[in-house]
Image (tube, rainbow, N blue to C red):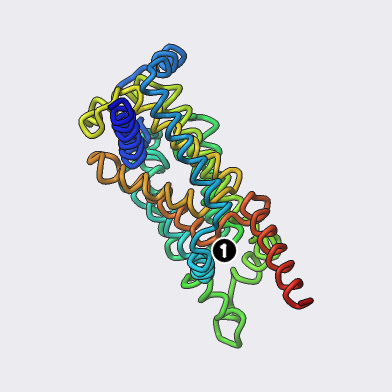
Amino acid sequence: MNQGRVGARIGSLASVVLVLLATAGRASAHVKYVTTESGAGDAVEFLVSALSDPFALAVLGAGGVAVLAAVVLYLRVRPARRDVTVFRETMAGYDDLLPWLLRLSVGLPLVGAGFAGYFFSPVVHTAAPTFTRLFGIGVGFLLLFGFGTRLVAAAGLLAYLVGLAFEPALFLAVEYVPGFLAIVLLGGGRPSADHLVSRLAAADTAYSRVDPFYRAVAVPFVRRTRGYGSLVPVVLRVGLGISFVYLGVVQKLLNPGEALAVVAKYHLTAVVPVAPELWVVGAGLTEALVGLALLAGAFTRAAAAVSFLLFTTTLFGLPDDPVLAHISLFGLVSALLVTGAGPLSVDASLRDGEDAERDGRDAAATAD
């Protein structure tokens, strides 16, 4: 009888953990974008109150143990190795389309921001609305066309950093930094106006004899950035990792007042009947964990897939969340699915270990 009760409680706890993890994305939004609630609340008091609940501790602990067990089990068993290999090879085969993906990821939300009248983030409006609109539309369309791509991305990055120095709220859109940097390193790729111009300027054409741009500006810029393309995965995952940690820790755990307002506004406790505090802590820790995984380059494609799931859940779960403001995150996470972790990462170390193990087996088989 007691065993049955214990089993039922464990089953209920596991169900709550799974449902909470699956729906955490609904609370994983930029809280500033979906609530007008002001006041951060006492973060220490909130965390003490939330973590003093035995049930909340059990759910969070079970979630942590489940994630850790899944990682250890995967590293020991390595299931579906061939499937993972084919997936990696297929995604890596899209690397020639990466510049186009990055241009779309940054250009589209900038055009939307220009027409909507905000500066990078929906919560930031400048004292010069005409400039804001022209900047967003101009930079966005040039990136979409792929014309003067590296220079335009550098100008966009400079504008963002200058704006950030005067308006800290722009940190909500910090994903633009890795996006712009990656475009500067990779250029416009193809299809793009830059590619077309370079072909016309390099061939024996009438345009090549009057070209004012390609040899004088584009070629020197390309020479200075050539050789740094391998750092694009590092730039993307570090930038996105910082964004996720900021959203999880600063926007959720250290800002419980607004985060709890989001839970109340969308009646999230009706989706999973747990305390609002557990919703906020669960969403914050989930985002922070994804961010730390990206920063370390550990299971990067899996973390990127989880990020995509969180964004998608937010998109459908929060009907008034500004979709345009999240296109950049969708696109950059998709780019990470293509690039993987790159150098200076846990994934690279694990891959080196796999290669060494494979070489050892091959050498032993040859000796036999």
Asked whether 293 or 51 is in front, the reply is: 51
Q: Residue placed at 55% from the left, 43% from the top?
A: 293
Identify the element where label 1 is drawn: loop
Vertical side of 177 occupied by 98: above or below: below
Disc 1 target residue = 187
Looking at the image, which residue sits at the far bottom? 204
* Residue 266 vertical placement versus 336 (above, below): above
Q: Nearer the viewer, residue 358 or 44?
A: 358
Count of numbered marks? 1
User: What residue is at 51 percent from the left and 49 percent from the top?
Assistant: 156
Residue shown at the point (53%, 52%) measured from the top left: 74
Q: Is residue 189 above or below residue 308?
A: below
Residue 263 percent coordinates (x, y): 28, 28
Q: Could one spot residue 127 in this view of the protein?
A: no
x and y percentages locating residue 264 in the rendered image: 24, 25
Residue 176 is situated, as x and y percent measured from the top left of the image, at: 49, 46
